[in-house]
Amino acid sequence: MRLILLGAPGAGKGTQANYIKEKYNIPQISTGDMLRAAIAAGTALGLEAKKVMDTGGLVSDDIIIGLVKDRLTQPDCANGYLFDGFPRTTPQADAMKDAGVTIDYVLEINVPDEAIVDRMSGRRVHPGSGRTYHVKFNPPKVEGKDDVTGEELVQRPDDKEETVKKRLSVYHEQTEILLTYYGDWAKSGKPGAPKYRKIAGVGPVES
Ligand code: AP5
Ligand code: ZN
């Protein structure tokens, strides 16, 4: 199974990815998590990415495409994968098409902008795994601790209200166009076209 999760920052891509990857036994390829791992490791890539991510902008297409192509050569991708937060621009989507990367399903998760800021301000993450919680909507079993490892949860530095607003506007300017990109491709019914599904992202996490 090869999937793309499309949706605004805070739509719940990472939250749903957690369930989908277990169900289909496929790796979650989250470019955001990969960049945060590079920041934590203090690599040159991480240092460069941090500057951009802290302002809510997008890391350059060349860097991202290189990271993902490299990731796809790893053996755990043989059975499929779940893209979370990628592709995010037309050049990123084109790069996958040109490389012959096939996709079975594109899932569009919809949440109104008004709900997003609330979600972000209550988000807590486990840096080691990327597991995501919300203080109110999806709390961990023990306050401030990861369910699996018991390690400390943290807030993401780009979850400040101003940065969230910037990320939302970048989403509308540069990523939303991919809804049409994949929607039209799916409608064309051409060989290799993905199936496209829209999902309301406002109900309970489980539904
Ligand atoms: P990235 O990490 O991809 O962030 P994002 O797309 O902005 O998405 P988020 O992770 O913020 O949200 P999400 O949809 O995963 O929501 P979540 O499940 O956590 O990217 C970060 C940065 O890296 C970018 O800004 C950019 O700089 C760079 N980057 C990454 N990929 C890139 C690329 N391809 N190209 C260029 N640059 C790139 O949920 C959010 C909160 O809501 C949580 O607290 C959760 O518990 C809660 N929640 C989830 N579902 C529900 C629900 N149904 N009801 C109530 N609360 C819910
Ligand atoms: Zn995420």
Image (spheres, helix red, strand yellow):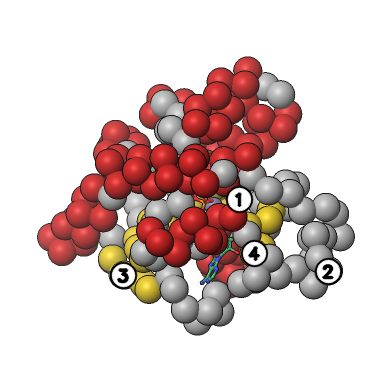
Circle number at residue 142:
2
Which residue shows up at 55% across the image and 24% down it? 51
Which residue shows up at 46% across the image and 52% down it? 9
Q: Secondary structure at mark 2?
A: loop
Residue situated in front as seen by the camera: 49 or 78: 49
Q: Amino acid at mark 4?
A: His
> Is the residue under label 2 in contact with that under label 1 (CB below 8 Å)?
no
**Mark 1 vs 4, N-terminal side:** 1
Q: Ligand 1 within 8 A of label 4's CB?
A: yes
Mark 4: few, some, or many residues within 10 Å (few <14, many ≥20)?
A: some
Circle number at residue 186:
none
Which residue shows up at 49% across the image and 31% down it? 55
Label 4 vs label 3, nearer the camera: 4
Circle number at residue 76:
1
**Mark 3 vs 2, N-terminal side:** 2
The answer for how far apart the CA atoms under marks 4 and 3 are is 26 Å
Identify the image quadrant of residue 135: bottom right
Label 3 vs label 2, nearer the camera: 2
Find disc 3 in the rendering and name its residue: 197
> Is the residue under label 1 in contact with that under label 3 (CB below 8 Å)?
no
Find disc 4 in the rendering and name its residue: 134
Q: Position of residue 24 (x, y in %)?
A: 55, 68
**Mark 4 vs 2, N-terminal side:** 4
Q: Secondary structure at mark 3?
A: strand
Mark 2: few, some, or many residues within 10 Å (few <14, many ≥20)?
A: few
